[in-house]
Image: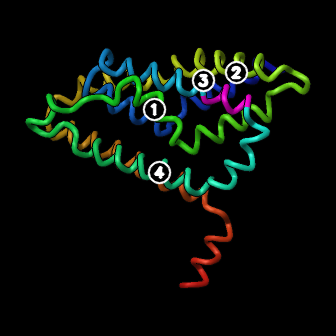
Amino acid sequence: MNFLALIMYLVIMGITPGPNNLVLASSGVNFGFSRTVPALMGMALGLGVQVGAITLLLGSLVAWITAIQIWLALAGCLYLLWLAWGMAHAGRPGEARAARPIGFVGGVLFNWLNPKVWLMGFNITMVFLPSGMDPWRAALLFSVATFATSLPCIAVWAGGGVVIARFLHSPLRLRAFNCTMAAMLTATAVWLLVQMLPADSFAAIQGMV
């Protein structure tokens, strides 16, 4: 196993913009770093567990995931759109106290509706799993490596949100930030859905037009 290449892959995937990082940055702005830590830990732990589960069950999951791929994409993208709606309405006068971050459990479950995370897990298993390696050992190794690598990467986004919050004391600027993050998350959801749609579906749409 090229362990260095695996770590580099995980760092790149963890630090680049995506639904997880956008949610954490928005949470850092609106709730502060300490209240974002449970979601942060949940996302990192959930990602590690998910990668380990995919490593163990890859053989039986491939056909199953392919069959429900479009439904997984739809469910995940609808959830991202719901989060985007919540972001756009965060920070309104009188609503800040009632609002809550997604929490540890929400962070753990967040990845399971994210098509990008599923594809990342499959890539890790298919590219970096050595032939003949015990699946349980590989699952444990991939889980620990994913958790240890993704945690500091996504923490950068949560901490970045806290830094940005210092410049968003104005309600108008805070609302503009939340709407911008919501728009980015919406665009991410649409992009992920387009990527997951079969190529022949676009041909069918063009034929109807």
> Quick check: marks 4 and 1 in contact, CB under 8 Å?
no
Given contact means CB atoms under 8 Å apart, are the residues at marks 2 and 1 in contact? no
Quadrant of the rendered image containing residue 124: top right
Question: Residue 169, which numbered label?
Answer: none
Q: Is residue 153 above or below residue 124?
A: above
Q: Compute the Cα span from label 2 to label 4.
A: 26 Å
Mark 4 or mark 1, whichever is nearer to me: 4
> Mark 1: which amino acid?
Asn
Disc 3 versus disc 1: distance between alpha carbons?
16 Å
Residue at the spot x=34%, y=22% of the render? 36
Q: Position of residue 99 (x, y in %)?
A: 21, 32
Q: Residues within 10 Å of mark 4 (few under 14, many from 20)?
A: many
Query: Secondary structure under badge 2?
Result: helix
- 113 or 154: nearer the viewer: 113
- Local SS, label 1: helix
Question: Along the polypeptide, which appears first: circle 4 or circle 1?
Answer: 1
Percent x, y of residue 184: 40, 47
Number of other residues with Cα within 10 Å of mark 2, as a class: few under 14, some 14 to 19, many 20 or more: many
3 and 2 marks in contact (CB < 8 Å): yes
| Residue under numbered circle 4 | 77
Placement of 83 over or under 159, stated as above or below: below
Q: Is residue 152 magenta?
A: no
Q: Residue at x 75, y 37 (%)?
A: 58
Q: Are marks 2 and 4 in contact (CB under 8 Å)?
A: no
Q: Is residue 79 left or right of residue 193?
A: left
Q: Which residue carries the number 3 mark?
A: 48
- Label 2 sits on what residue type? Phe
Image position, residue 143 (x, y; %): 65, 20
Question: Label 3 neighbourhood size at 10 Å, few (<14), some (14-19), many (20+)?
Answer: many
Q: Pick whichever of labels 3 and 2 is earlier in the sequence.
A: 3
